[in-house]
Image (spheres, coloured by chain):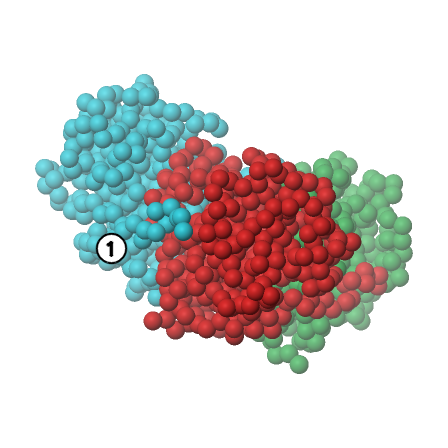
Chain colours: A red, B cyan, C green
Amino acid sequence: MVVDAQLQKPLRPKDGTAGIERPKALMDSIAEDPRHLVALSSRHVVSSRQFDRDTLTQLFRLAAQYESTPALMHLPLQGKILISAFYEPSTRTRLSFESAWHRLGGDIMSITDPKSTGMAKGESLPDIAEMFNNYGDVIVLRSNQDRAIYEMLDTLRIPIVNAGNGIDEHPTQAMADLYTIFKWRPELLDPELPANRRVRVGIIGVPNRMRTVRSLLLLLARFSSAFSEVVILTDEAQPFDPGQQEELAEQGLSVRVAQHLNAELPGLDVVYINAIAWVGDSYEAMGADLKLSTASPLKQEAIILHPLARGEELSTDLDGTPHNWYFAQARGAVFIRMALLTCIVRRISEVMDTP
Amino acid sequence: MVVDAQLQKPLRPKDGTAGIERPKALMDSIAEDPRHLVALSSRHVVSSRQFDRDTLTQLFRLAAQYESTPALMHLPLQGKILISAFYEPSTRTRLSFESAWHRLGGDIMSITDPKSTGMAKGESLPDIAEMFNNYGDVIVLRSNQDRAIYEMLDTLRIPIVNAGNGIDEHPTQAMADLYTIFKWRPELLDPELPANRRVRVGIIGVPNRMRTVRSLLLLLARFSSAFSEVVILTDEAQPFDPGQQEELAEQGLSVRVAQHLNAELPGLDVVYINAIAWVGDSYEAMGADLKLSTASPLKQEAIILHPLARGEELSTDLDGTPHNWYFAQARGAVFIRMALLTCIVRRISEVMDTP
Amino acid sequence: MVVDAQLQKPLRPKDGTAGIERPKALMDSIAEDPRHLVALSSRHVVSSRQFDRDTLTQLFRLAAQYESTPALMHLPLQGKILISAFYEPSTRTRLSFESAWHRLGGDIMSITDPKSTGMAKGESLPDIAEMFNNYGDVIVLRSNQDRAIYEMLDTLRIPIVNAGNGIDEHPTQAMADLYTIFKWRPELLDPELPANRRVRVGIIGVPNRMRTVRSLLLLLARFSSAFSEVVILTDEAQPFDPGQQEELAEQGLSVRVAQHLNAELPGLDVVYINAIAWVGDSYEAMGADLKLSTASPLKQEAIILHPLARGEELSTDLDGTPHNWYFAQARGAVFIRMALLTCIVRRISEVMDTP
């Protein structure tokens, strides 16, 4: 019997960023306060701007509770229907949301082929929103048009979640990013964190053209006490929209721009890399020198985040190192989405005592 | 915090055509008689011709029961599998059927990409039907070929529902249309309705080239005591197939053709508009003067129906008026499909006492 | 009321190869030994080579148990998520797996459009595998690349099932093929079968270019005591890979090549026909004379198998004859997949007593 050796091996055990210890520790570090989650009932999720520090903190707590619970005894979303509308195809984000929804016991209707939709036939966005009202309980929308989700809001009577709208925002990705950072160091949630415990974040990306970066910066600003500085690494001459930096500064987030990655790396605790910039209908790679590998001068304790899918900017030789928190980040995205979806469809009382 | 004002608002309350009062009133006006629903067990649904007045009336009653029940205690289709086969793409109709099925607790396998199917590779329709026999409990089929569903019937051992076959029929759409009319005025179901309570229906469309119109006329004829006249508004010289008008006349439905919409509108109680004519593989708009807006000379009490998606023929300025029953029509389509599907997969005894 | 006669008929009763008698008889002929099924826990299913005779026999028993049980009282896969990843489109195989999974109570996320996936955007197979780890409990993969599934194995921490990889293998199809043969004659499972009860199998196909044929031969070899000879019917000069025949011979399976179908048919008990050879990205029909119809000189008792979809090589005039076991084969594929999936996701203890 000639079978590949891999087929005889037991499945590989989980790596150190998996397991239930870290989410359990994060959960234990946060006092439960369900009022902030109840307040999310029937709310749309369009922009990171909608979320304050307390609400985010409670979402992280609930996500950590889900992640540290191997199997739910009770499925809070039974009988609820998700409309998973990916007008811009994205297998990764779609599966993440759909997995979250299924784990909570809900049913799903998917739209994955933009060409087969009413939108392709010229149907208006408000009319599509009215259709969604009748057929589902919540919508997850990915679109390559910034305005699409906004044009639906007036019509919608069910909540909608922005899963990426053009170059504008991707708020649940940013929540997953922060959830990862706080699983790594729960102490960063402490508003009284001593200055010498703060961390420096590097973001390889363009704030005014990458939705993940835009949304992440907005959420980092909610926890500005945790971050001594954010360094934007880019070749772009104008990486910000007018007012974008000022909005962050008002909340105490110090943002600086730099061009030389390797010069900054020795001072960075968190390195966020995302080499895909959305430009019209196509992708554009960032500058060729903004790449990470085991040869990069990373701090020993530094963690790397990447919203994935990755290209050449993030070498696979980092996968087996303790710097790799991007896989934990992808894994955690399911749990933060579970937390958020539970709240907006008004089922938080199924998983915790509410006032 | 700068967030769009819409994101701060609570979700818009339902309009006057929603709510449970109207379906409750319709339900209460019909005496329950489950025998007609039991007789639908394991039956195909291909043509409006298959349905008599009593069966339709009981289906409307069950639909109204579903619509006026906020959440089902018991899911009658648990363990049943729907094959949702849309060989002609249609997000709206597909989601309507899939939402109906999910609300009843069933599972779904969707075919949304015609190019990926056996049919595209030259597999015969009977072979596809035999495949469906083995993998599901019921099929919903949309095809741009009139004959496709008929070529499957001899092979099928599970029921199939016609969700639109070319320019032939779309019987569940017609059921949704009538369900809406009877929610509007339950008295129209009375076979002894005085002549002066009858209503006049205008249909902007072509009976021999539009499946929705063909199926609707067949069902209107089952309730000819309710309708003083049907006026077909069209520019076509030959809007009927041979025998089509005669078949309707035999059942007492008076059908007249007219060309000038605005001349007829002051006399119409129900205005059915459907500007999309299926012609081969493409769409063709109707005459440019057959359009509705708030400037149209509508009767004050008149309601407008449209199977949607709409184009320019139906102005959005009517959306906020009491004439708008097309949104209620789309909403109701879910419940009539729930009623029908419950019956054909032999689960009616799960939702009512049966003989 | 003019309705097609077919719509008035009750649904056609099942044919002789359906029903629960045959699977019941097969089940009763096999002594239950769950150890072999427990050993499949968390195992990948890539090649027919992974399966020994005892394991296959117990899988056939469990499949027969599922097939002879009209409705499961208990759904063993509730809360489990299948990632149904068909990078090469195949409605038939996809629906077969998805139907199996749904009947066991599990949820599904489907990937049916290769162009919308990360793979199309250049994402690596290990990265896709890592994504799958986070979002599902098991993967079913169809790909037109032989190596795709192998390149995922090192990364995967959840089991993957090969649903066809290029021209390499399709092991669950081969299991369905053998399951059909043993339902036809359970005595063939007897290791002490007298030589005069053995059957002769003809395979119209090319072992080194057809994944179904390659996988089937490997499984036939596990039961070489049942088969007096396998005759490969092909026009190809080199129908075997180096070593392919020798591997089979070592296990006692006698394989011979012939070119003239009609000369062999009178000596064949089982005729396996599969006219579709995978060649790069396109299909290629086999020799035009390798066709079956009622005019073919079939043994009276012979059964015909075909993995479907069929083309011109298998005449529909055989559908109504007792030779037709290809429909039973398609039907049985659901149950063998149910059996296999139950085991690999570690839920066998939900359906039988395990040690």
Which quadrant of the rendered structure holds the N terminus of chain A? Answer: bottom right
Horizontal and vertical percent position of residue C320: 59, 48
Horizontal and vertical percent position of residue A136: 40, 52
Q: Nearer the viewer, residue C101 or B255?
A: C101
In the image, taking residue B155 as reference, residue C176 lies left or right, namely right
Quick one: which residue is furthest to the top in this view? B237
In the image, taking residue B319 as reference, residue C144 lies left or right, namely right
Quick one: which residue is furthest to the front in this view? A195
In the image, taking residue A178 as reference, residue A155 lies left or right, namely left
Q: Nearer the viewer, residue A223 or C264?
A: A223
Horizontal and vertical percent position of residue B124: 58, 39
Residue A1 visible, this angle: yes
Residue at 35% x, 41% y is B173
Residue where numbered disc 1 is placed: B20
Q: Relative to residue A192, is residue A284 depicted above or below? A: above
SS label for mark 1: loop
Please state which amino acid type lies under the numbered disc 1: Ile
Q: Relative to residue A3, is residue C261 depicted above or below? A: above
Residue C133 visible, this angle: no
Which quadrant of the rendered structure holds the C terminus of chain A? Answer: bottom left
Q: Nearer the viewer, residue C79 or C257?
A: C79
Quadrant of the image occupied by residue A269: bottom right
Q: Relative to residue C26, is residue A243 depicted above or below? A: above
Residue at 57% x, 38% y is A238
